[in-house]
């Protein structure tokens, strides 16, 4: 039951990891915006 409930969250996590893996610029973009 718990595995079925957490499946959407699991897919979101996998999608986020894949996005960061294929587009690493996203990770460094936000800290660069915060620095004056």
Image (cartoon, rainbow, N blue to C red):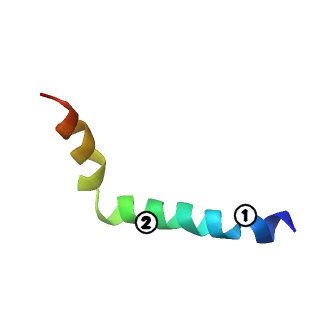
Question: SS class of the residue under badge 2?
Answer: helix
First in sequence: mark 2 or mark 1?
1
Residue 30 x %, y %: 26, 43
Residue 31 x %, y %: 25, 37
Residue 13 in the image: above or below residue 36: below
Residue 23 in the image: above or below residue 29: below
Q: Which residue reaches farthest left? A: 36
Q: Decide if residue 32 is on the left or right side of residue 18.
A: left
Gap in angstroms between the C-alphas marked 2 and 1: 18 Å
Q: Which residue is mark 2?
A: 18
Q: Which residue reaches farthest top? A: 36
The image quadrant that residue 5 belongs to is bottom right
Q: Which mark is residue 6?
A: 1
Question: SS class of the residue under badge 1?
Answer: helix
Q: Residue at 64% x, 69% y: name it.
A: 8
Q: Residue at 18% x, 39% y: name it.
A: 33
Q: Decide if residue 1 is on the left or right side of residue 20.
A: right
Q: Residue at 30% x, 48% y: name it.
A: 27
Residue 36 x %, y %: 12, 28
The quadrant of the rendering that contains the N terminus is: bottom right
């Amino acid at each position: 039951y718990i595995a079925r409930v957490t499946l959407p969250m699991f897919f979101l996590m996998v999608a986020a990891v894949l996005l960061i893996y294929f587009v690493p610029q996203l990770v460094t973009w936000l800290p660069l915006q915060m620095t004056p």
